[in-house]
């Protein structure tokens, strides 16, 4: 059964896609820790990041670097934290989290519940900063 990320990548269900290439797709987390929290997902549906083939793994991280730059420009923050946890969805993904303090990347914090309009605005702001 396809993961929720595969369904978004295939445009079977809606998602705020920021950018995509042949290896990966960047989309907003719909329950973000902070505004701008973005997920970078390989097109290949592999559960565990370290099970990706080397080429996909490298391309995923290079793409994440470009997306992180755009997120940082579009979102007031000091840094972009990265996290790979992979327990919620059985499809490898990298979290890009704008942070001003260490606590901004604390996954025990309550998640935000932005409206669809707020997510669309955030996605557009990040898209505008993509190279």
Image (tube, grey):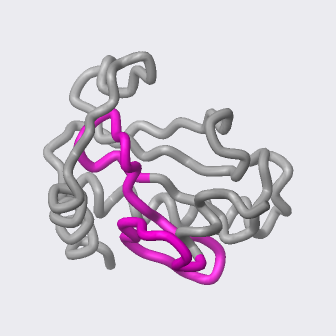
Q: Determine the residue positioned at 79% across, 61% down.
A: 1
Q: Is residue 111 left or right of residue 50?
A: left
Q: Quadrant of residue 127?
A: bottom left
Residue nearest the viewer, comparing 16 with 103: 16
Indicate yes or no whether the magenta region holds residue 4. Answer: no
Q: Is residue 111 left or right of residue 43?
A: left
Which part of the image, by quadrant, shows the C terminus?
A: bottom left
* Figure check: 102 above or below 66: above
Number of residue marks: 0
Q: Is residue 111 left or right of residue 49?
A: left
Residue nearest the viewer, comparing 76 with 112: 112
* Figure check: 36 above or below 128: above
Q: Which region of the structure is painted magenta?
A: 10-38
Q: Determine the residue positioned at 55% across, 81% down.
A: 21
Indicate yes or no whether the magenta region holds residue 35. Answer: yes
Percent position of residue 111, x then y:
33, 30
Percent position of residue 98, x then y:
29, 41
Percent position of residue 77, x then y:
19, 40
Q: Quadrant of residue 24?
A: bottom right
Q: Quadrant of residue 113?
A: top left
SS majority, magenta: loop
Q: Determine the residue positioned at 78% across, 49% down.
A: 47
Q: Determine the residue positioned at 85% across, 50% down.
A: 51
Q: Is residue 98 left or right of residue 47?
A: left
* Figure check: 56 above or below 12: above
């Amino acid at each position: 059964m396809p993961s929720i990320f595969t369904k978004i990548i295939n445009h079977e269900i809606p998602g705020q896609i920021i950018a995509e290439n042949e290896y990966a797709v960047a989309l907003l987390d719909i329950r973000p820790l902070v505004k701008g929290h973005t997920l970078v997902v390989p097109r290949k549906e592999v559960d565990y990041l370290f099970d990706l083939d080397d080429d996909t793994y490298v391309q995923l991280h290079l793409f994440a670097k470009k997306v992180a730059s755009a997120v940082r420009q579009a979102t007031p923050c000091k840094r972009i934290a990265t996290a790979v946890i992979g327990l919620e969805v059985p499809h490898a993904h990298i979290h890009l989290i704008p942070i001003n303090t260490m606590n901004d990347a604390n996954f025990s914090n309550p998640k935000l519940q932005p409206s669809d309009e707020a997510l669309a605005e955030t996605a557009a702001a990040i898209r505008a900063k993509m190279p």
